[in-house]
Image (cartoon, rainbow, N blue to C red):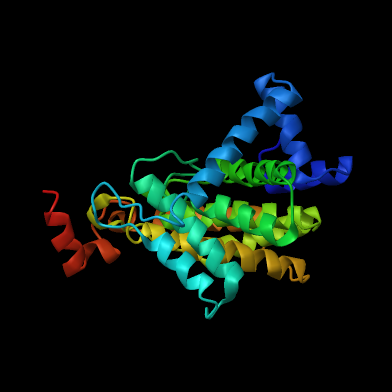
Amino acid sequence: MFNKGSELLKLCKDNDKKISEIVIKSEMESSDITYDELMNKMKEVLKTMDKSANSALNKEIISVSKISGGNAKKIENYKDNGKTISGDLINSAMAKALSTSEINASMGKIVAAPTAGASGILPSALLTVKEKFNLSDENLIHGLFAAAGIGEIVSKNATVSGAEGGCQAECGVASAMAAAAIVELVGGDVESSFHAASFALINIMGLVCDPIAGLVEFPCALRNASGVANALISADLAMAGIKSIVPFDEVVDAMYKVGKAMPESLRETALGGIAATFTGNEIKKRFE
């Protein structure tokens, strides 16, 4: 039904529909599924996201490797002290993003949106906005469909794989999905959703994928925390009326070319970046 951002934008304008509404219709047609069946499936997705984003806030969850864990609780406690630098909203979002990352690293159940390594960004963004604006689960489900539309376009025209495009293709795309969804959820127009998605990708264009010991833990979890902050500020930029002078489709194409230009050592091989530091190599030796 659509392959490019420009095509989805035109469909929205021609039919006076939101991104989520077009994506829902497209999914119903391609999957031969009823509206109620589709909504029920997405309810289960949201339920899983909600659980993973909150499970590590009040108890330490340590990864299988023992490399990481407990940071979601630290941020949550820090937020509750009322002395944060960036405020409750950002810290709450970061805590939720870290929570999902820790559930993932401890072999718990998460939703890969678009990947397991970037799975903390979309849930934390939507749940944080839900709390601030008193949104319903039904609102969030539509937000997930808006996010899915952005993810589908990137998947068709570029990549969401860290091995192929670096972390910009994982955390960057997750941030873009979240930013577009947030704008729709708070009443922004379709153009603003695409501007927000563009900003999110532009902000971390070129981000490498360098997991220590090849494990999706460090610095991956930290990038989920910064990724949700990126999504939130990108949505604010768009809602303020700021426009991306480069269209979304061109931003996606640029991201893909940058990913392809990265050396192999910076694309999930754990041979460069943070993974190649002295400490990174010492940690790696534990698993050899």
> Horizontal placement of 168 versus 41: left or right?
left
Question: Does 75 sit above or below residue 39?
Answer: below
> Horizontal placement of 85 versus 187: left or right?
left
* Foreground of the two, 264 or 175: 175
Indicate the quadrant where residue 148 lies. top right
> Is residue 245 in sight in this rendering?
no
Residue at horizontal 76 percent and vertical 31 percent from the top: 25
Question: Does 106 sit above or below residue 171?
Answer: above
Point out residue 144 in the picture as x, y percentages from the top left corner. 65, 43
Residue at horizontal 52 percent and vertical 70 percent from the top: 80
Point out residue 205 in the picture as x, y percentages from the top left corner. 50, 64
For the N terminus, which image quadrant?
Answer: top right
* Foreground of the two, 163 or 120: 120
Point out residue 95 in the picture as x, y percentages from the top left corner. 49, 61
Indicate the quadrant where residue 138 lies. top right
* Foreground of the two, 286 or 146: 286
> Horizontal placement of 108 versus 225: left or right?
left
Point out residue 46 in the picture as x, y percentages from the top left corner. 60, 40
Indicate the quadrant where residue 38 lies. top right
Residue at horizontal 48 percent and vertical 46 percent from the top: 52
